[in-house]
Image (cartoon, grey):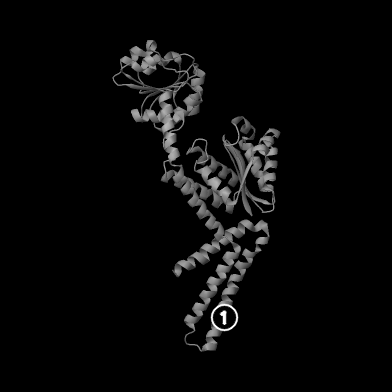
Amino acid sequence: MRLVCCGISFHDTSLGEREPVVLTDAQQRQILRAIHQAPRIHEGFALCTCNRTELYLYAEAEVDVSAFAAALIAEISPAAEAVWRLHCYVREGLAAVEHLFRVGAGLDSQMIGENQILRQLKDAYSASIEEGTSRFFLHRLLHSAFRAAKSVRTQTDINAGAVSISAAAVELAAARIHLAGAPVVLVGAGENAALAAAHLIKRGIGQLEVVSRTIETAADLCAQLKTGRPHTLDALPELVGAADLILCSTASETPILTADNCAYLLSQRATPVVIIDIAVPRDVEPQVGQLDAVRLFNIEDLDRQVRDNLNRRSAQIPKAEQIITEHVRRYGQWLDSLSITGIVSELVDTYVKLAEGEARRYGGQLDAAGREQLERFAVSLVKKVLHGPIQYLKHSEQEELVWDQLQAAELIRKMLLETERKVHS
């Protein structure tokens, strides 16, 4: 049996090349069902994000896993197959384990340390459980990957600081005002505005006013966010006077907030307002930033912040790599501990020695012949008791029982070997 990872990622492909291989939820389920039905592919899951599509398969040694994976992708579309065959990489054994651990920890992401990949990995695992393609081996593998990711995130600053413009805007705002309960005006209803709003809502802001060119687009975003009040641009001058934070992200070719349309209302404020403009071209006229009651920041300020955060994250990579190496080493030790031959040998050796020791302990009042007979009896009894478990483990030539054998090996190791070592340590 062997673990194989086959996939494509942003390292070797452009977004346009990856698009045909970005799997829908239905297509991922289709692949999982095909894995479930394959007689010699025993476990597997599919990880699909905007930056990668990977199949992890636990298969019999003789199976051409690469060809099997390519056939699954070919069922999606000819375009997907063409990209897959041209750019697919393959990793096996502990190399596949290390790759998975690095992916889960955000070390193989386009944006180092990003958190979304771990949720996506957990979603892929959940889908494989629902489709019956994750059993004993992948349960252990995925939970080990989750532990490795947690160790990296708690022992390093690999995910410290925002590295997207939307998140950086909210981070900057939080450093300058108390966001919890703060009234916020969001100008724009596009993707960046929606991402920024989601980050703001997580910070517990107060009333959210969403301003867009049409009331329909503003209302759609409010519905998506499940909060906020929609407005058109006509309401903007009045809204800016009551906000603690104004975040602008539209596609307008000319400024929306100008000194002419908002200077008077802003000048009447008792406390300054923070305005963050993440639009290109700018939504806020530079002269607005000269008003006493305004603290204006634009995308250049955020670019510097993002670069600083990326540098901080990059500095954490060596430490994160060391943590991953240690988790891979532990996982490799666990795999080695499941060696059928090794467990059988240790099991017999441990309990034969135990039987001989107990025979000597209780045979002190017997003559030499009696002690020898007691020892033969004790050893024979132990071997008879162990016969069933040993025969089950040695049944490994029949690959269809591999999950049960691995689980049995793990239970025997924990119950009969580790426990015995602790008793006599």
Q: Position of residue 50 (x, y in %)?
A: 57, 34
Is the C terminus in the top left, top right, bottom left or bottom right quadrant? Answer: bottom left
Question: In which image quadrant can residue 410 be found?
Answer: bottom right
Query: Which kind of residue does numbered mark 1 sit on?
Result: Phe
Q: Residue furthest bottom?
A: 367
- Can residue 272 be spotted in the picture? yes
Q: Position of residue 120 (x, y in %)?
A: 54, 40
Question: In which image quadrant can residue 80 be found?
Answer: top right
- Can residue 132 be spotted in the picture? no
Task: Say which residue appears at 61% left-offset and 67% top-offset.
Answer: 390
Q: Which residue is mark 1?
A: 377
Indicate whether 182 appears above or below 71. above
Indicate whether 144 appears above or below 78. below
Query: In the drawing, does residue 351 fall left or right of residue 422?
Result: right
Task: Say which residue appears at 49% left-offset and 84% top-offset.
Answer: 363
Task: Say which residue appears at 59% left-offset and 58% top-offset.
Answer: 406
Query: In the drawing, does residue 322 fall left or right of residue 131?
Result: left
Q: Residues within 10 Å of mark 1 (few under 14, many from 20)?
A: some
Task: Say which residue appears at 52% left-offset and 48% top-offset.
Answer: 145
Q: Position of residue 388 (x, y in %)?
A: 61, 68
